Image (tube, rainbow, N blue to C red):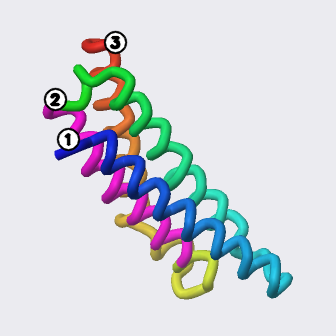
């Protein structure tokens, strides 16, 4: 698995989604999904690109089990959070309906970042 490449490729996919979503909001004048747009760009594009660059600059980090765990936890957590946020903002669920998926997704993102931090501490 090429952790660096995978993070960056998926990050660019999120960037394209964020741009198209932003264009839709701008064209329609409906900005109720602005928090989702921001999360797509931050959790998707920005964080994944930063992670990808760090794994490329410090290749000793990329081959570890921590890197693979980080990658999969971030993918599952970010996607889960974005879906839950879309459901919430679109009125399909209320805040109570976000339990237990949103807290688990948030925990996955946090655990992924902690795996990244430990990996960075060990290899940087």
Residue at left offset 27%, top offset 24%: 59
Label at residue 64: 2
Instruction: Pinpoint residue 119: horizontal percent, then vertical percent.
Output: 27, 22
For residue 2, which quarter of the picture?
A: top left
Give the magenta part as a residue range.
64-86
Main SS, magenta residues: helix
Instruction: Pinpoint residue 103: horizontal percent, then vertical percent.
Output: 40, 56
Residue under label 1, please give it.
68
Q: Confirm whether the magenta stretch covers residue 70.
A: yes
Label at residue 124: 3
**Residue 96 placement, left or right of 68:** right
For residue 105, which quarter of the picture?
A: bottom left
Q: Between 89 and 68, which is closer to the camera in this rendering?
A: 68
Instruction: Pinpoint residue 44: horizontal percent, then vertical percent.
Output: 49, 55
Asked if the residue under mark 1 is in contact with the one under mark 2, i.e. CB atoms within 8 Å, the reply is yes
Residue at left offset 45%, top offset 46%: 48
Q: Is residue 20 above or below residue 53?
A: below
Which residue, as the protein is rendered here, is positioned at the far right?
A: 29
Q: Is residue 103 above or below residue 94?
A: above
**Residue 74 placement, left or right of 90:** left
Q: Is residue 71 above or below residue 56?
A: below
**Residue 34 placement, left or right of 112:** right
CA neighbours of label 1 inside 10 A, class few (<14), some (14 to 19), many (20+): some
Give the mark nearest the N terminus, 1 or 3. 1
CA neighbours of label 2 inside 10 A, class few (<14), some (14 to 19), many (20+): some
Q: Between 54 and 113, which is closer to the camera in this rendering?
A: 54
Label at residue 30: none
Is label 3 in a helix, a strand or a loop? loop
**Quarter in which the C terminus is drawn:** top left
Structural distance between the alpha carbons of marks 1 and 3: 17 Å
């Amino acid at each position: 698995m090429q952790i660096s490449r995978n993070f960056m490729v998926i990050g660019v996919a999120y960037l394209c989604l964020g741009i198209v979503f932003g264009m839709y909001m701008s064209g329609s004048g409906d900005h109720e999904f602005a928090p989702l747009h921001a999360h797509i760009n931050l959790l998707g594009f920005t964080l994944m690109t930063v992670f990808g660059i760090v794994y490329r600059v410090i290749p000793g980090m990329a081959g570890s089990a921590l890197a693979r765990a980080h990658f999969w936890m971030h993918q599952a957590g970010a996607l889960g959070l974005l879906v839950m946020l879309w459901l919430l903002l679109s009125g399909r669920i209320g805040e109570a309906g976000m339990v237990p998926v949103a807290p688990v997704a948030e925990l996955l993102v946090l655990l992924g970042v902690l795996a990244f931090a430990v990996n960075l501490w060990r290899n940087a």
